[in-house]
Amino acid sequence: MNEWLAARNILAVRLDNIGDVIMLGPALRAVKETSPEARLTLLASPAGATAVPLLPWINDVIVCRATWQDVGGHISFDPERELQLINMLSECKIDAALIFTSFSQTPHVPGYVCYLAGIPLRAGESKEFGGSTLTTELRSAPDQLHQVERNLRLVEHLGFVARDRQLKIDIPEEARAAVPTLLAQAGLNLHDSFIIIHPGASAQARRYPVERFGFLARLLTRRGWPVLITGVEREAALIEELLEYAPLAHSMIGSTTLAEYSALIEQAALVICNNSLPMHLADALNTPEIILFSGTEYEEQWRPRTTRFRLLRRATACHPCYLFECPIGLACLNIAPEEVVEEVEALLEDTRTVKVSNESLMAGGSR
């Protein structure tokens, strides 16, 4: 029998941002559907762990800030911390570890941690030689492969069967029930169609300029659209600056859980964002979206795969640069707010046309 399918205590390792964990959903679903009796534990970063309530295939979560994921040397030198992680994993008596990485990350460091923790089966995808830190090493796919497919490629190689490749999240009913109150607090009505603008992103090089987001919000409000600006607490200054350009827009800063924020995206007519978490949530919830996608990465790696969308980027010679700070003024996002509004209106009209067509088909079929 396939030893991976026989495993009953499986660890999934993904120590990145929330969006990366959301994109892990189809692979986790494939594992649980193929081995329903297996217990699935996620090893996640503090941010990534917040996505767990939306992914019903996860039984437990271990939170860790790993030195091998530390960008910029912000984690203090403390070998004892890593030894504690190894001991904790050892106590969990895990049968197998699935190590999920992006195209640029190595699975061998977490693979070695899992080896030291006594986990007998360890699988990952790699570009480089890593000895026997992994028991199953899948040679790396092309960099442009979408992250969801990269994750699925690993579990399918091990024998797990993916019957559904779409992003999906499970929003608790209490989160949906909170939406009317949240909208009322922001000055919006549940029954009014509204547009969400999320100006933040994890890196400066991925953010459409705030003044342009502000002009965009102002243009939309002038066309009669209720606009809701969203962000986390650390983005408060960014949102306040945006609102100076669009005083009629509404805002919501850090006042929701991730599940409640997902329920807001589910209710929105359209989402406008950078290459950031809302892009993945909207894709999972089939909410139309406009993405201001900078030239830091290949679009093929991260773009929506299911929902209706428009992805906007100017072609530049430096694409993809993989930088966190842009040294040349974000030429890749040199897109006028008026152009974005045109794309918004075209996408909304397209969405309305499809909805009317589907309703007509359903009405015809019910006769």
Image (cartoon, rainbow, N blue to C red):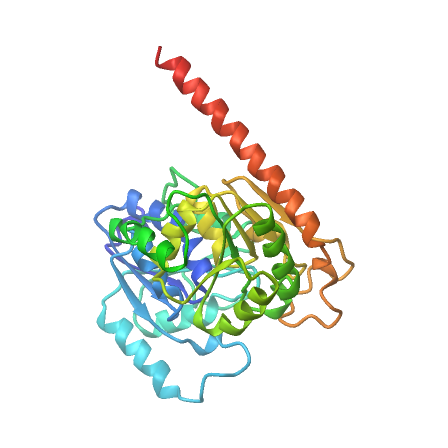
In this rendering, the answer to whether 328 lies above or below 224 is below
Q: Quadrant of residue 261?
A: bottom left
| Quadrant in the picture for the C terminus | top left
The reply to whether residue 50 is visible in this rendering is yes
- Comparing 131 with 312, the one in front is 312
Could you tell me residue 266's position as x and y percent? 40, 46
Left-right relation of 286 to 160: right
Which of these two is toward me, 31 or 354? Answer: 354
Q: Quadrant of the N terminus?
A: top left
Report the residue at 48% width, 49% height from top.
148
Q: Is residue 179 above or below residue 192?
A: below
Residue with the most extreme top position: 367
Frontmost residue, 113 versus 19? 19
Q: Which residue is rendered at x = 69% and y = 64% of the image?
A: 321
Name the image quarter holding residue 115.
Answer: bottom left
Q: Position of residue 136 (x, y in %)?
A: 43, 57
Q: Is residue 119 above or below residue 274?
A: below
- Identity of the residue furthest to the right in this view: 317
Q: Position of residue 287 (x, y in %)?
A: 47, 43
Figure check: 280 above or below 113: above
Q: Nearer the viewer, residue 32 or 250?
A: 250
Q: Is residue 310 left or right of residue 356?
A: right
Question: Image point 30% across, 70% down: which residue?
Answer: 118
How far across and how far down the image is residue 316, in percent?
76, 57
